Image (cartoon, rainbow, N blue to C red):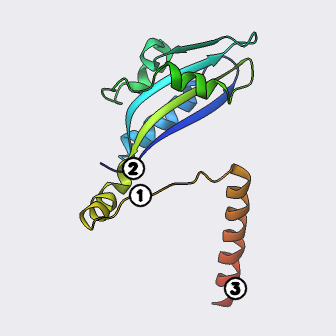
Amino acid sequence: MGPVECVVLAFPGERLKVAAVTAFAELRRAGQVRLIDSLVVVKSVAGEVSTSELVEYEEYDEATAEIGPEVNLLGPEDAVEAAETLEAGSCALMLLVEHVWAERAAEAIREAGGRISGTVRIPPDHVDQARDAYREAALAAAGRS
């Protein structure tokens, strides 16, 4: 298996947009990720937290049709933790995914006696800065050739 990660995608409003589910389904169909489990978390305007499964929503049927079986690993404790990151009147899609694209590298690392000893999630503003710096460096390199 490749690296596994739990990703919490937050959205305004108490209902997920079909486009968000479709975008993830496209990654799955392309073989980049494998969905192990998912959970929809809603934090009402009053601050009440509720959860549901993607399969409970008919509007996501087309997007989720080819996702495959899920294992119920995400539970109430995970939903509470995700809800702490949400504003009232919003929702989140929790995804427990395997990074299939990294599976062979992960196997080679394990065969060599190695392991992933930690990961760090880079904040979005830092990602923006890194993207801008990369673009500038690529333009500068192109200008030198």
Q: CA distance from mark 3 to mark 1?
A: 38 Å
Label located before the other in sequence (3 or 1): 1
Q: Is residue 102 above or below residue 6?
A: below
Give the residue at x 37% y 54%.
101
Give the residue at x 74% y 19%.
88
Q: Which mark is residue 3?
A: 2
Nearer to us of marks 3 and 1 is 1
- Near mark 1 (Cα within 10 A), the count class, few <14, some 14-19 or many ≥20, is few
Q: Is residue 89 above or below residue 1?
A: above
The x, y position of residue 91, in whole percent, is 64, 22
Nearer to us of marks 2 and 1 is 1
Mark 2 is on which residue type? Answer: Pro
Q: CA distance from mark 2 to mark 1?
A: 8 Å
Q: Which mark is residue 143?
A: 3
The x, y position of residue 4, in whole percent, is 41, 44
Q: What residue would you read off at disc 1? A: 116
Mark 1 is on which residue type? Answer: Ile
Mark 3 is on which residue type? Answer: Gly
Q: Is residue 7 above or below residue 135?
A: above
Nearer to us of marks 3 and 2 is 2
Dots 2 and 1: beta carbons under 8 Å?
yes
> Is disc 3 placed on a helix, strand or loop?
helix
> Is disc 2 placed on a helix, strand or loop?
loop
In the foreground, 139 or 50: 50
Label located before the other in sequence (2 or 1): 2
Label located before the other in sequence (3 or 2): 2
The x, y position of residue 43, in whole percent, is 67, 17
Give the residue at x 29% y 59%.
104
Tell me which corner region of the image, top left, top right, bottom left or bottom right, holds residue 145.
bottom right
> Is disc 1 placed on a helix, strand or loop?
loop
